[in-house]
Amino acid sequence: MGAVKLELHCGSQRVDGIVVDPEPDWSFDALVSELNALETKLATTSTKPSSLNKTTSRGNEIERGRTFKLHAHEYEMEDTESEDDDVNDDRALVVAGKRITCDELYLSDSDDSDVMSAFEVQPYLMDEVEEVEGALFELTHEHQLRVKDEIRSKISVLESALVNESQNATSSLLRVEKYKTTRQELDKKFDTQYQRRIAEELDNHLTAVQQDRERRSQIEERKIRNDAANEEAKRKIALQEEKKQQEKAKAEAEAKLRAEEAKQAALEAERKAVMETKRKAAMEAEKRAEKETIGNSERVTSGATQQEAAGRPTDSASSLSNVETKKSGTGNVCQAAASALNLEHGRLQKLTELYERNQLIRSSSNKDYTRHENHIFRNIKTIRGSRDSVRSKASDLIKLLNDPQYPQSISVETFAKKVVSNAKAPGSAPFASAYVIVLVTSQVPHAMDILLAELHRVCPYTVPKHMVYKKSTFQSKEAYFKSIGYWEENGKMESTEDYLQRLESYVKMYAALVQTEIPKVQNLHGLQHGWAWLARFLNSLPANQYTAVSLDAFLRMAGFALFRRYKSQFLKMLNTISENFLVDLKSRNAPELRKTIAEIQTYIEDKMFLQEPEGRSLQTNLLSKECVVR
């Protein structure tokens, strides 16, 4: 069964060693100990019959009205034990008029028998208590009952207050929970509204940013279109000006050509007149001889015939030989066509003026142009034989030459020098470089003359021009070699083999330049200039080691394009080379000429001019659709 609550209400004295008024705060173990002591005392007194006899002798009976009662109340029992609870609610022991109520002691069901046996005392126990003592006990008991009632009332009040407080706390907790729930709902609602507002503001901001970007993009597009339109207008104006200049130059060239033709015609007429005079003189001499002696007539006639035959011109080769001999006889050191020398003089004069202007700029300014010049050189030396490379390098070089931060004269000078110096570099691509040159000079026209002048300066055979060695003109062989382009390093002249390699590189670059054709892009020094170079070369320059290497390099680079345009006229040029130039070379019997003679002869005999030279057609999408190799 459940725990048993035992209350003991007695006086505050000790009776026979038994504590009548136990401590109200006793623990269960202390109460059990006190009960054990009480049981021991009762057992001790039961062994004294004299006390019992004394009580009985007095004739007093145990008062039934004043009893010692021990009540045991059981609380918090399960519903299944209700019957036992009814029995135990009013359990009491009557001992000699003394009443003990056990409300504060809790015992388990297993201890009920022990407690009850402890309080089952014999009736003779009360015989020892006197009436005064019984009254005292009764008063004490009543006092204890009143105190207990007060305590119970206070406990009841406290319990009611505790219940009320508990109810208030529960109510407060419920209110707090309700407030918390309401607050959470409000916070959730506010969060939803705040997030919605944030989303709206973010959407508005993104919309504004997008609109601003669109406006900026439209402004940039308009600016780009306007810049492109301005550039196109400038380009058209420049093309028109260039076209006018070219037409003017063409007219001047045609006038010079007509003047040259008239001069040649006059020379031819003079030559014919001289021959006619000689013929008439011979006929008169023959007539005089016939008159003098008949025996000498045949001899005179034969001599006249031979003289006439010697004075009759045969072919163009003989006329070229006469021209060379005449120039040598007059002591002319420089062998070149007059028109070629005039062009060279004009270009070199422009180059000199450019050098002087740039020198003045550098001396008057503390600005360092080294980085700008290196940037130009990096773009030139990285040109490759692909369309993308040509397009990107040409575009970058045009921007660098038109950079307003640097004087254009310095940029053009650097461009010309670096292009020429890169021509002799191993692995250079002459055809790709020629495409870049044509594209750049189409936007910066005056750069072409500066480039050609720089090329003439380092290689006179690009004029074409040949210097004849004469002791009266040159102090030494070294001075002569320097005049035709030999390099001197550390006081030592370079070998002829090294010089011929550089000579070949320069002529190849020049030939690649004149044969380059780009649709809708004008080559300021195109194929007609290459045809003029070949004619001047064959008419003015002698056949030697230097001119042979130059001619071989030029034919291999530009022969294909010359044949495509001039057809039979070019074939006549090749015949002249075979019948005159090669014959003169072979007549020298120089071992160093054999290789070059064989190469030129193979080129003509195998018709290698029908094959497009390697590298002339650029690889995969180099230029735009307008820049397609024809």
Image (spheres, grey):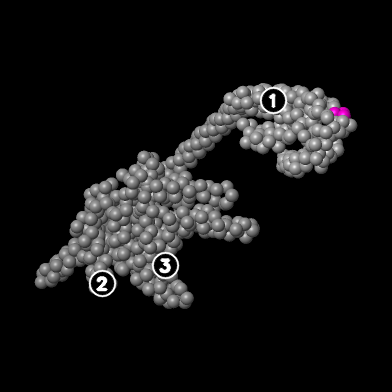
In this figure, which residue is indicated by the disc labeled 3?
A: 485
Amino acid type shown at disc 3: Gly
- First in residue order: circle 2 vs circle 1: 1
Dot 2, how many residues are within 10 Å of its Cα: few (below 14), some (14-19), or many (20+)?
Answer: few
Q: Is residue 126 above or below residue 530?
A: above
Q: Which residues are magenta?
A: 135-139
Judged by depth in the image, the label closer to the viewer, 3 or 1, is 1
Judged by depth in the image, the label closer to the viewer, 2 or 1, is 1
What residue is drawn where x is 41% and y is 54%?
Answer: 383
The quadrant in which residue 31 appears is: top right
Residue 253 percent coordinates (x, y): 39, 48
Amino acid type shown at disc 2: Arg
- First in residue order: circle 3 vs circle 1: 1
| Label 2: which secondary element | helix
Give the label on residue 588, or none.
2
Give the label on residue 79, or none.
none
Give the label on residue 89, or none.
1
Residue 223 percent coordinates (x, y): 55, 34
What residue is drawn where x is 54% and y is 33%?
Answer: 217
